[in-house]
Amino acid sequence: MTELHLHLDGSLRPETVWELAKIQGIDLGAKDIDELKFMMKVPDDCKTLHECLERFDVPLKVLQTADAIERVTFELVEDLSNIGVDYAEIRFAPQLSTEKGLSQDEIVEAAIKGAKRGMEKYPNIKCGLILCCMRNENIEDKNLQTIETAKKYMGDVVCAVDLAGAESLYPTEMFENVFKKANEYNLLRTIHAGEAAGPDSIRKALSYGTKRLGHGVNAIFDKELMEELIDKGVTLEVCVTSNYQTKVVDSIDKHPVKKLFDAGVRVTVNSDNMTVSDTNIHKEIKILKEQLGFTDADIEKMQKYAEEARFIK
């Protein structure tokens, strides 16, 4: 089983966050573990991607030390192994863990250490780390540092870079300089696009040289763009539950993933955030089969697409 699109900070064990907060002396604003679990999951009445992204505020509070980053990375590898995932790419933004003085290099080194420890204990799984640049204002220096860090550690578990965050607020075109530098270093990349914004965001991402798109489902509204994705062999990292939660689609049964797949677009199935979205790849596959009309053969083909698109061969 292959998982290409999974956020570290969206997949932490609530019990670990609770324990780390006690160790670090942090008040999470929760009176008990049940309230913390509620705070870490997307609410049923979530209205926008931006509101969903607020669910990451709590786990990030405890991800400001190297020990914590190493631990949660190890635990996610463990959790993935336990549900039968044999290849996963885990993504996170190192710049979001610098509040207490850690450098992005130190943060990535801690994540690498945790991933390696997980793979040593569970040799049935292989993992890569994707370093996310972030969509925001006045953040180019931090994003360029992420690119430099990716260059430094590329091949040592680190396998690619990404651009994540509030797509509708910070258009993909704002980050041209970041991907010019990524191109200079020949870094592999995936880009969140076509989730909270439309086809133009996808086109801009393609102009940056990406062969993979995080989500990309709004390509369904542009036939020519769909044909371009097919012709170029671009892979979409689709996360159905997450797309419903962030109101990319009004309901699960209206999700365009089957139409994209039937048209010949290389779509893959992913969980996005195991804790925030309360899901995993098996739950996502069940939704595809029971609610969206996918067959076992379709799922097998999607897994083949995922295996072919992985950054670590």
Image (cartoon, helix red, strand yellow):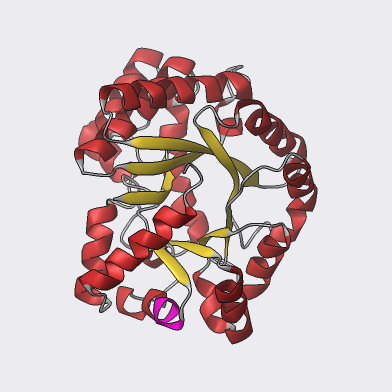
Report the predominant secondary structure element of the magenta stretch. Answer: helix
Image location of residue 56, percent across then percent down: 45, 42
Tell me what residue is drawn at x 32 percent, y 22 percent. Answer: 120
Image location of residue 14, percent across then percent down: 28, 34
Question: How many numbered marks have been drawn onto this rendered protein structure?
Answer: 0
Q: Which residues are magenta?
A: 259-263
Tell me what residue is drawn at x 53 percent, y 74 percent. Answer: 218
**Is residue 180 at all visible to an observer of this figure?**
yes
Image location of residue 271, percent across then percent down: 35, 53
**Is residue 46 at all visible to an observer of this figure?**
no
Can you name the residue that lies furthest to the bottom here? 223
Residue 157 position (above or below residue 265)? above
Q: Nearer the viewer, residue 178 or 273?
A: 178
Image location of residue 19, percent across then percent down: 29, 21
Quadrant of residue 304 within the rendered picture: bottom left
Residue 189 position (above or below residue 213)? above
Q: Nearer the viewer, residue 89 or 34?
A: 89
Q: Is residue 261 magenta?
A: yes
Tell me what residue is drawn at x 36 percent, y 36 percent. Answer: 126
Residue 149 position (above or below residue 176)? above
- Image side of residue 51 versus residue 146, left or right: left
Can you name the residue that lies furthest to the front here? 313
